[in-house]
Image (cartoon, rainbow, N blue to C red):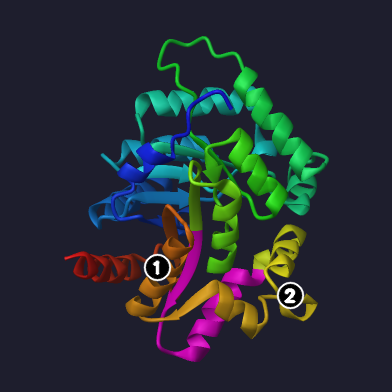
Amino acid sequence: MSDEPRAAEWRERFGSKIGIWTLALEGVEIRQAMEFAKIVEELGFDSLFFGEAYGREAFVNSALLLSATNSLILGTGIANIYARDAMAANAAARTIDDAFSNRFIMGLGVSHLPLVERFRGHTYQSPIDTMSSYLNALDKATFMAKGINDRPTRVIAALGPKMLELSRDLADGAHPYLVTPAHTKMAREILGPDRLLIVEQAVALTDNRDEFLRRAHLHLEFYSGLPNYRNSWKRQGFHDEDFVRGGSEKLKDALVTFGDEEAAGQSIQAHLDAGADQVLIQLLGEDINKPPVDDWKRMSNYLKLQSS
């Protein structure tokens, strides 16, 4: 990677070190989603990250949400590299970066075999080789429009050691998803001090155990069927019996925080202590398809009290 490490400058922008990760904006019309992005910004969170699967195109979505806000950092978590070639991704990211300077992080990932082959009609190939080739192609991509010349900041959806090494060598860092603080510690050790580590932490703000299990089940139901996550969880110490649909209770407790704002704060701190630069909390509301504004407000109020 030709550019100097960018972790230090992003760490300055991550004022609270806490952002929001959500898929729930897909459940509302885009103009409503833009209003919800404003709320995230007004509540004081550093950033807003979202995924790309069956819904909105990641770069168009980023530009629209950025246009609705003033300082909020937007990140794709992740943009599927099978959805567009490297030249298109480079052009999109540079265009966004030029329009919204220092507010966009391009998260890239190899996605999962079912999503790539069944829904997109591509052939899923070696994740490491495919990502390495894609990142090298990004660096070589021609871009002739007038604007800034700096390469857009990019992080990789990295889970295993080899992809984390690639995040260190060919990107600005990593964006692991569905991981424990122990994984965050391992990731930091591999990345070293000069790369970004942006992790996601799911939280169910409820004191009802049955309600927690319901929300955690809905959250993990899709992911528990994907081989890449199963392999990651095995490396984190889980076993086949934990990969029942929606995950075992043990897996739910490890990946989703159960309790109040203080419990959520402890989980956030555990990731920060393990080396994360930014922790993206994914608040699982009563209806996972609706933006959990009340929970965002609860966490915002708690975090403001903690910092005062």
> In the drawing, does residue 31 fall left or right of residue 172?
left
Type of residue at label 1?
Gln
Image point 44% across, 90% down: which residue? 208
Residue 206 horizontal/vertical position (percent)? 40, 83
Q: Nearer the viewer, residue 305 or 204?
A: 305
Residue 166 horizontal/vertical position (percent)? 66, 40
Image point 44% across, 72% down: which residue? 267
Q: Residues within 10 Å of mark 1 (few under 14, many from 20)?
A: some
Q: Is residue 210 magenta?
A: yes
Q: Residues within 10 Å of mark 2 (few under 14, many from 20)?
A: many
Q: How many marks can you see?
A: 2
Q: Is residue 228 above or below residue 261?
A: above
Is there a contact, CB below 8 Å, between mark 2 and mark 1? no
> In the drawing, does residue 301 fall left or right of residue 193?
left
User: Quarter of the image holding residue 234?
Assistant: bottom right
Residue 196 horizontal/vertical position (percent)? 48, 45
Q: Nearer the viewer, residue 247 or 263?
A: 263
Mark number displayed over residue 243? 2
Residue 258 horizontal/vertical position (percent)? 46, 81
Q: Where does the C terminus fall, quadrant-wise?
A: bottom left
Mark 2 or mark 1: which comes first in sequence? 2
Q: Is residue 199 above or below residue 82?
A: below
Closer to the eye: label 2 or 1:
1
Q: Is residue 105 above or below residue 298?
A: above
Q: Give the residue furthest to the left.
A: 308
Q: Judging from the image, what secondary structure is the residue with disc 1 in?
A: helix
Type of residue at label 2?
Phe
Residue stretch in magenta: 200-221
- In this view of the protein, can residue 85 be seen by the observer? no
> In the drawing, does residue 250 fall left or right of residue 298?
right
Residue to which mark 1 is pinned: 269
